[in-house]
Amino acid sequence: MAHDYNNILQNLCHHLEHFASSGVEIVPESELIDQLAIDSVKLLNLIMEIEDEFDISVPINILADVRTVRDLADLIHKIKSAS
């Protein structure tokens, strides 16, 4: 199944709804840690879900540069495009 960027962003926001604090609006500019309260355990669980859904492998060391929802969507799109 082809995943264009907007589809990736939409699916990512859907997954984040399960991990973020309730009542928090999730937009591409939302910061994962500061605004959505995604801690390291939640992030690893989110990455496992993303890997399953998009059939990709996300290198853990590259996550240090991911700050926002858009950063994560960009990373998923880049990995997906390379495969």
Image (tube, rainbow, N blue to C red):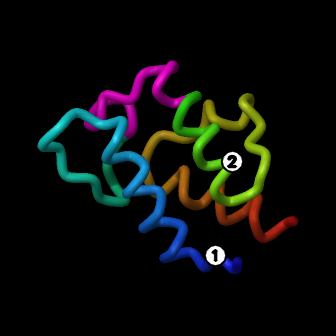
Determine the residue positioned at 72% across, 63% down.
78
Determine the residue positioned at 63% across, 35% down.
63
Please, what is the dominant secondary structure of the magenta stretch? loop
Quadrant, the C terminus: bottom right
Does 8 appear above or below 22? below
**81 drawn magenta:** no
Check disc 2 and give the amino acid type: Glu
**Which is more toward the observer, 11 or 82?**
11
Check disc 1 and give the amino acid type: His
Q: Which label sits on residue 64? A: none
Does 2 appear above or below 46? below
Q: Which label sits on residue 3? A: 1
Q: Which numbered disc flags the more N-terminal residue, 2 or 1?
A: 1
Q: Is 50 displayed left or right of 31 in the figure? A: right
Quadrant for residue 39, please give it: top left
Q: CA distance from mark 2 to mark 1?
A: 13 Å
Quadrant, the N terminus: bottom right
The residue most toward the left is 23
Near mark 2 (Cα within 10 A), the count class, few <14, some 14-19 or many ≥20, is some
Determine the residue positioned at 54% across, 59% down.
73
Q: Which label sits on residue 51? A: 2
Quadrant for residue 22, please give it: top left
What percent of the width, then of the height, locates residue 59?
77, 37
What percent of the width, then of the height, locates residue 70?
46, 57
Span of residues in magenta: 32-43
Does 2 appear above or below 37? below
Badge 2 element: helix
